[in-house]
Amino acid sequence: MNRYAGKKIDIVEVGPRDGLQPEPEFIPTRKKIDLVDQLTEAGCQKIEVTSFVHPKWVPQMRDGKDVFAGIRKKDGVVYNALVPNLRGLELALAAGFREVVSIMSASESHNRKNLNMGVAESLSEIEKINAVAKRHGARVRSYIATVFGCPIEGDIPPRKVLDIALALEGFGSYEISLGDTTGMANPASAHAIPGMIRGKLVSASLAVHYHKYFGLEFANNLASLEAGVTVFDGAVGGLGGCPYAPGAKGNCQTEILVEMFARMGIGTGIDLEKLRQVGRYAQSLSSLLSQKCA
Ligand code: MG
């Protein structure tokens, strides 16, 4: 008797953006387009394609407009772009995106370090992003980073995460993704925090976004599934940084996550064999993974 059989969940593939962003050597636009096209072919339903961050800070994503113009867009598949501020939103809309992803941290120090703003300031910026996006008919997905712990501040009170999640929902974000930015979650917190927040959200759906920690990321996803979460972020090939660089661990590897769910009888709509091939291609693009960091 398998109580999971026939259950359906959604996977959000973040490899092309979250995964490739920290790569030190510029990856040719053509190869980024290939990666997104292969993910579409494998059956991914939502793909984070790029970001619109100042190229001085994230030179790897400076070709976001060209990547989006070059990909083969399949009906029904959602392609989105990370925007850290209103300027990013304007660029994403001009490039043709109809879904953007906002980001802020639950930790004051981490937010200042990464976005050069306080938490209150970020909330106000995201409120504006939501308002402008809505006027353009675009949807907003929102990340909250450092939900399960901050490398600077340590524990983050779940109440603080809840307040931010409710504010984001109030601004109109249709989905909120709880980020374990540096791999600090454990199955207890991965059950308790999303479970508590999910029960308080009225309209927004809840996603989890775990980073690698020697396999603990899969236990964390399972714990969140048990808490009622149905949307899971992953990066194909486990792209996203080097475990030897503090604070830069890779993302949960999508093809293994999909295989775990498939073995449990849970459907994702993704062709696992094709996704494994995309994983190998993704790893071939990464100089971080081809060093001693796999
Ligand atoms: Mg990530």
Image (cartoon, grey):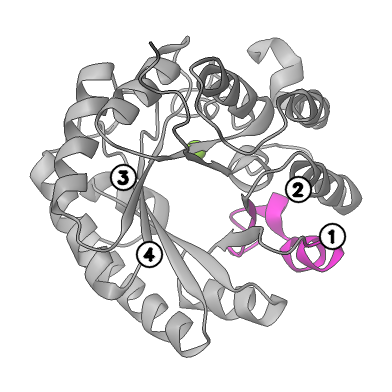
In the rendered image, residue 117, in percent from the top left (x then y), is placed at: 31, 62
Residue 278 lies in quadrant: top right
Residue 72: mark in rendering:
1
Q: Which quadrant holds the N terminus?
A: top left
Amino acid type, residue under disc 1 in the picture: Arg
Residue contact at pointers 1 and 2, CB within 8 angstroms = yes
Mark 4 secondary-structure assignment = loop
The answer for how far apart the CA atoms under marks 2 and 4 are is 22 Å
In the rendered image, residue 151, in percent from the top left (x then y), is placed at: 30, 30
In the rendered image, residue 149, in percent from the top left (x then y), is placed at: 25, 31
The answer for how far apart the CA atoms under marks 1 and 2 are is 8 Å
Residue 114: mark in rendering:
none
In the rendered image, residue 183, in percent from the top left (x then y), is placed at: 39, 24
Is 192 magenta? The answer is: no
Q: Alpha-carbon neighbours of circle 1 within 10 Å: few (<14), some, or many (≥20)?
A: some
**In the image, what residue occupies the spot 69% across and 77% down?**
96
Which residue in the rendered view is the most extreme toward the bottom? 135
Residue 40: mark in rendering:
2
Note whether 107 is above or below 224 in the view shown. below
**Magenta stretch, residue numbers:** 48-73
The answer for how far apart the CA atoms under marks 3 and 1 are is 36 Å
Pick whichever of labels 2 and 4 is earlier in the sequence: 2
Q: Which residue is mark 4?
A: 174
Q: Which residue is mark 3?
A: 110
